[in-house]
């Protein structure tokens, strides 16, 4: 059977040019750069013949090019979607599996950057760095430096929700550097995994009751959507901080603002919202003890390079007929193998 050329499309740009350097000129692969501002007819013509679609981040994809069922139905040759980072909540995974289309991510590529962002938020909150900065900018008044007395991280307890690529790095940082007690909730790993990742297995409610810092590091799925709300916040210590670098939609932002207004927790650090970006008058913007960043925990020069490199290598694996290492929907593999052989030609590994 003759092997056909593999068409890989992407909009605007990759996370880093290294991906284009790695893929451009590879025998049998043709890159097609599209633009959201181009005529839809031309874009759909390219997508209809595409075998792979490299996605942008969730809030950077524009209609009508979301990886949902309508696009899948218009792209009969499509074999795989690849996301920029680890999150794949923008994809209709069930529709992909039914159609025999692979979904892959770049899990782990930005884990060091995200873990360090969590640490940065923890230090800034506990040492009241941002609060002090804001007050200094307002100028002299009825306040003094003793109003910004901080706390060390040393010996305190962190509760991690999701002990995967990011969570395990947070565990190593907090346990190894600050001698913190590390609790973790993750129903998808073994007791041995908890041990190897340096965390004590804890129940979901215990994370909130026992921790001085709660860090959310799980994906947004049907199971985790709106998983954290008023009941969980109200379990927390008054001296505790809530931090999330995961996805907006996991936590209830309105309920968080309410417990902060009642002084029931010490503060919060949020890198993610639903929707993004949040409005300038969002209730959480009103608190000096809340640190907000624009979904940049995983955005560093280092992580962008890693994500692009991971993606390029994974496309090479896919187009060579091998099973990709970060496959989200393995149930699609049997049907995908038949489609690959029919559309591209050549053998696909079992």
Image (cartoon, rainbow, N blue to C red):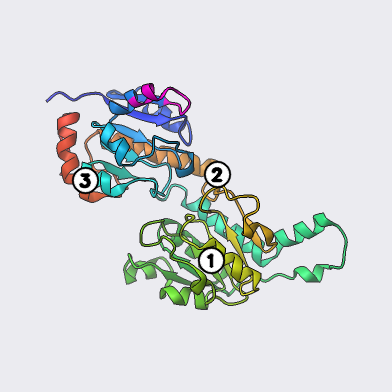
Q: Is residue 139 left or right of residue 154?
A: right
Q: Residues within 10 Å of mark 1 (few under 14, many from 20)?
A: many
Residue 297, given in percent of the width and then of the height, sits at 54, 51
What residue range appears in magenta? 34-44
In 3D space, how far apart are the residues under numbered discs 3 and 2 (Cα atoms)?
35 Å
Q: Which mark is residue 98?
A: 3
Indicate whether 346 appears above or below 194.
Answer: above
Quarter of the image where the N terminus is located? top left
Instruction: State which tag comes first along the sequence, 1 or 2.
Output: 1
Q: Please rate how many residues cluster around mark 2, counting C-alpha atoms within 10 Å: few if below 14, some from 14 to 19, many from 20.
A: some
- C-alpha span from label 1 to label 2: 21 Å
Q: Quadrant of residue 137?
A: bottom right
The kind of secondary structure element at disc 3 is: helix
- Give the residue pinned by disc 1: 174
Q: Magenta stretch containing residue 35, yes or no?
A: yes
The residue at the point 53 percent across, 54 percent down is 273
Say if residue 329 shows up in the picture: yes
Going from the N terminus, do you reach mark 3 or mark 2 first? 3
Q: Quadrant of the C terminus?
A: top left
Residue at the image point whose x is 43% and y is 45% from the top: 85
In the depicted structure, whether residue 177 falls above or below residue 102: below
User: Residue 339 location in percent, x, y?
Assistant: 17, 36
For label 2, the SS is loop
Q: Position of residue 63 (x, y in %)?
A: 42, 36
């Amino acid at each position: 059977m003759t092997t056909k050329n593999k068409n890989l499309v992407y909009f605007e740009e990759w996370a880093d040019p290294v991906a284009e350097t790695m893929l451009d000129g590879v025998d049998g692969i043709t890159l097609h750069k599209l633009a959201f501002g181009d005529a839809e007819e031309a874009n759909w013509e390219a997508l209809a013949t595409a075998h792979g679609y490299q996605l942008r981040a969730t809030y950077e994809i524009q209609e009508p090019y979301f990886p949902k069922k309508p696009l899948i139905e218009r792209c009969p040759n499509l074999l795989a979607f690849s996301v920029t980072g680890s999150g794949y909540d923008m994809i209709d995974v069930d529709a992909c599996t039914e159609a025999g289309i692979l979904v892959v991510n770049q899990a782990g590529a930005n884990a060091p950057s995200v873990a360090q962002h969590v640490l940065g938020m923890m230090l800034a909150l506990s040492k009241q760095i941002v609060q002090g900065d804001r007050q200094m900018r307002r100028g002299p008044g009825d306040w003094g430096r003793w109003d910004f007395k901080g706390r060390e991280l040393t010996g305190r307890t962190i509760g991690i929700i999701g002990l995967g690529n990011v969570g395990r790095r947070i565990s190593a940082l907090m346990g190894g550097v600050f001698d913190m007690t590390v609790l973790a909730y993750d129903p998808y790993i073994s007791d041995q995994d908890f041990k190897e990742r340096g965390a004590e297995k804890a129940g979901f409610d215990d994370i909130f009751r026992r921790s001085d810092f709660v860090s959310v590091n799980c994906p947004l799925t049907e199971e985790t959507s709106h998983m954290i709300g008023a009941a969980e916040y109200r379990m927390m210590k008054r001296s505790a901080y809530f931090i999330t670098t995961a996805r907006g939609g996991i936590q209830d932002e309105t309920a968080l603002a309410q417990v902060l207004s009642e002084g029931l927790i010490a503060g919060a650090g949020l890198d993610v919202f639903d929707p993004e970006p949040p409005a300038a008058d969002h209730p959480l913007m009103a608190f000096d003890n809340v640190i907000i960043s624009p979904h940049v925990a995983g955005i560093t020069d280092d992580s962008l390079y890693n994500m692009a490199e991971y993606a390029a290598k994974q496309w090479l694996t896919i187009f060579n007929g091998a099973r990709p290492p970060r496959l989200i929907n393995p149930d699609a593999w049997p049907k995908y193998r038949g489609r690959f052989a029919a559309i591209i030609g050549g053998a696909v590994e079992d």
